[in-house]
Amino acid sequence: MTNDEWGGKLSVTRHLSLVTCHLSLVTRHLVVFFLLFASVSFSQVPKDQPKPKPTTRILFVFDASQSMYGRWQSDTKFDLAVKLFSNILDSLRNQTNLELALRMYGNQKQFPPQDCNDTRLEVPFGKDNISRIKHTLKTTIPKGTTPIAYALSQAPKDFPPCDNCRNVVILITDGLEECGGDPCAVSLELQKKGIMLKPFIVGIGKNFREQFECVGTYFDASNEKEFRNALNVIISRTLNPTTVQVNLIDVYGKPTETNVNMTFYDNFSGLVKYNFIHSFNAKGLPDTLDVDPLMTYDIVVHTIPPVHKDSVKLTSGKHNIVGIEAPQGYLMFKASGNSTLKYLPCIIRKKGRYETINVQQFDQLEKYLIGSYDIEILCLPRLMVKDVEVTQNHTTTVEMPLPGIAVIQKSTNGYGSLYQEDKSNLVWLYNLRDNQQQQETLYLQPGTYRVVFRSKYSNLSSYTTEKTFKVEPGQTVNLKL
């Protein structure tokens, strides 16, 4: 490869008895010691602790504006919505890891005049507060206007700080924004900040899909049955466990790749939601992950280089399988003669690309996506190896000529450079450190070199010294300046 590519019977019986007794004691001690050691050792083996399930917090934003007094099916919109909603609340009484809260708008000030700040958290988050929510709804009289954007903007105050919670907003309304606010903009901002997940909206009596699709997931409820079904679907999507299995596919179409981190990003906000290091379960299948079904995900598999799969939508309450192509092979380096080199970095780039995707040490085995790579070995002078092919489950070995080592010792600080002699030309390779470092060790390819040096304390250029030396494969040259 060229530079350009590259321990009388009685006494005996007594003695034996003593020995036997001694050995018995030793054996007992050894057994006790072993048991104690084993007990300590096994007790120190870490056990996997499952992560606690997050608490789901649902904030109901309920419309109590004057228009909710309008007739709808067999009763007023408000009374029917409260009745059907109360039935849903009763079904949630035995749910674990669930907290509910109620915010209302339009329930404090009579319209007219219009009060666009007419919203209040009536029942804060807490356990076993369903009866309180039902009572609040039952005793409310719709009277005011519809400040949807302002009500949504107050949600951050409603959700207390929590490290392991998922925040869901369900808006129930019979009309549109009446205070000039922008519910879409407010919803987008809260989602981007990670304050809440994409909200659900149930529109009563009239189809507002076009106006509310930008706010969240809209459900039309033109009659009582649709309203009941909408609430059931929303609760099901929110609470039913959803799992996902990520298959990392090899070149043969089999899910054999594993042991690599996967980052799940919220597609909308760009926030990191999960990190999972891929593994196989006891059956040899990709492990099952519990994830939130209310988001669309961008998944990054941190292979080298990384693999992306964007806009992954999951089906709530189901086991989802996501396939991502990530075929990989191995790459390692060696010097001729089976010699091991350490601390010699190699730059890895995709074929024909300039960006560095990894810096791999010479004594390191690393995994890469299959494909062609260009490699730069950072010995001096540098070696360029083009078109290195990494194939499925195979270890590609890049071999270079055995370099030598130059140990350059300086008696004083100073300025200097290392050059390779190429016929009558000097090719610059390296500048010596001019700080307190008195010795530098460099890997050099076999060849002839020259070092040029001047002490930091010499103020005449004529005090410059030169030394020429030759480097042989596997040999160390000590050079004193």
Image (spheres, rainbow, N blue to C red):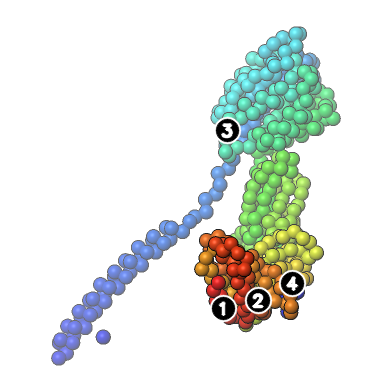
Q: Earlier in the sequence, mark 3 or mark 4?
A: 3
Neighbour tally class for label 3: few under 14, some 14-19, many 20 plus, Cα within 10 Å: few
Residue 213: percent from left, percent from top: 80, 32
Give the labeled residue for mark 3.
Answer: 161
Residue drawn at (57%, 33%), measured in percent from left and top?
Answer: 161
Lateral position of residue 218 relative to residue 44, left or right: right
Instruction: Tell me how far mark 3 sits from mark 2, CA to CA.
Output: 65 Å
Q: Earlier in the sequence, mark 2 or mark 1?
A: 2
Amino acid type at mark 4: Val
Instruction: Tell me how far mark 3 sits from mark 4, CA to CA.
Output: 54 Å
Height in image: 68 above or below 460?
above
Instruction: Tell me how far mark 3 sits from mark 1, CA to CA.
Output: 62 Å
Q: Which mark is residue 449?
A: 2
Amino acid type at mark 1: Thr
Which quarter of the image is occupied by the C terminus? bottom right
Give the labeled residue for mark 4.
Answer: 385
Give the labeled residue for mark 1.
Answer: 476
Provide the secondary structure element on which disc 2 rests.
strand
